[in-house]
Image: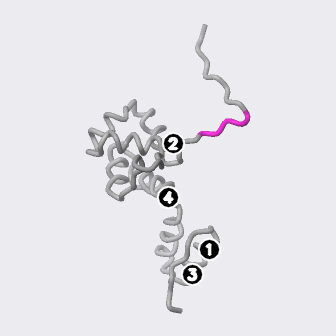
Amino acid sequence: MAWKQPKQSPGYKDEASTPARLIRKRMKELGMTQKFLAEETGISEAKISRIMRDSTEPGDSFEWTELDINKISIVLQWGKQGRDKLRYAIYPELVCYDAALENREGIVRLNCRLQGHGFPLIETKI
């Protein structure tokens, strides 16, 4: 008898954060463990565990760094596009910043983009 993946109930919701889901999916594709990811990136196993759980409990939370994002992206062999997808999942407002930079827009236009997505605006003296 073949093993089948159980169907999820209609109310099922994946509680893992988008970054954790992206990382978990890629690790599965590569047959990689959290321990291996920690060893290869030089990020502690505890922090990798917190990332994968999206831990926000006091004393158990973590802060993403650009270096963490780059190390994980390199070990997961994502390339620049994959790295950017992870960055945008962690910091969604960067989509607005990158679009403004690409289009050589000023702060006012960036603030319009940010406001349109519900992100905090950049304070100006204008």
Residues drawn in magenta: 10-14
* Disc 1 + disc 4, Cβ < 8 Å: no
Q: Earlier in the sequence, mark 2 or mark 1?
A: 2
Q: Name the kind of residue labelled 3 in the image.
A: Arg
Q: Amino acid at mark 1?
A: Gln
The x, y position of residue 58, in whole percent, is 44, 50
Task: Return the residue at label 3.
Answer: 109
Vertical relation: 81 (above or below) 112 = above
The reply to whether the magenta stretch includes residue 66 is no
Which of disc 4 and disc 3 is earlier in sequence?
4
Dividing the image into 4 quarters, which one contains the N terminus?
top right
Q: Answer whether labels 2 and 1 touch (C-beta < 8 Å).
A: no
Quadrant housing residue 46: top left
Reading the chain from its start, which is encountered first: label 1 or label 3? 3
SS label for mark 4:
helix
SS for dot 1:
helix
Amino acid type, mark 4: Tyr
Q: Position of residue 125 (x, y in %)?
A: 50, 91
Mark 3–mark 4 Cα distance, whole angstroms, equals 20 Å
Q: Main secondary structure of the magenta part?
A: loop
Residue at 55 percent of width and 72 percent of height: 120
Distance from disc 3 to disc 2, alpha carbons, whole Å, reads 32 Å
Q: Name the element at disc 2.
A: helix
Identify residue for label 1.
115
User: Is label 4 in contact with label 2 (beta carbons under 8 Å)?
Assistant: no
Tag 4 residue: 88
Q: Residue at x 51, y 42 (%)?
A: 21
Real-space Cα distance between discs 1 and 4? Answer: 17 Å
Quick one: label 4, few (<14), some, or many (20+) residues within 10 Å?
A: some
Q: Please name the residue that numbered disc 2 is placed on.
A: 21
Of tags 3 and 2, the one toward the viewer is 2
